[in-house]
Image (tube, rainbow, N blue to C red):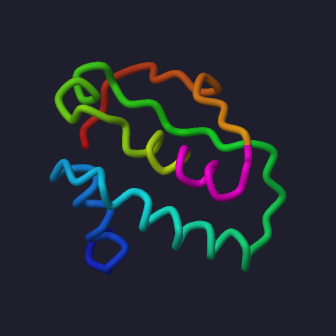
Amino acid sequence: MYDSPAGAAVRILKFHGVSAIAPTMAVLMNETLAEWSPPIDFIVPVPLGTVRKRTRGYNQSELLAREIHRHTGLPIEPNALRRARATQP
């Protein structure tokens, strides 16, 4: 799953604490969204477990959602999902 260049970027963002890569990733995601043009009402970041968020210091999906919002103006619904249990990375 993480063998491609995009997968390596995800791994760096999620597991190596390099949150500065999120804006660059969001630019590429926005380009894909523009080409694909799916009907989108809002962006829903996937919630992180409390321990993982504390350990990592950020939720990578929230970072990406904020960057995509900044470029597209799409609203973010951060509370649309709730994590029911902790899962393995």
Instruction: Classify 89 as above or below 79.
Output: below
- Residue 27 lies left or right of residue 20; in this view the side is right
Question: What residue appears at the point 68 percent right and 69 percent down from the top-left corner?
Answer: 33
Question: What residue appears at the point 37 percent right and 30 percent down from the top-left corner?
Answer: 48
Q: Nearer the viewer, residue 63 or 39?
A: 63
Location of residue 42 (image quadrant): top right
Instruction: Point out residue 6 in the picture as x, y percentages from the top left corner.
Output: 37, 74
Instruction: Point out residue 9 in the picture as x, y percentages from the top left corner.
Output: 30, 67
Q: What are the residue bounds of the magenta stretch?
A: 66-74
Question: What residue appears at the point 22 percent right and 60 percent down from the top-left corner?
Answer: 12
Magenta region, main secondary structure: helix
Instruction: Classify 48 as above or below 15.
Output: above
- Residue 84 lies left or right of residue 18; in this view the side is right
Instruction: Point out residue 59 in the picture as x, y percentages from the top left corner.
Output: 37, 37
Location of residue 68 (image quadrant): bottom right
Q: Nearer the viewer, residue 34 or 84?
A: 34
Question: What residue appears at the point 63 percent right and 75 percent down from the top-left corner?
Answer: 32
Q: Residue furthest front?
A: 70
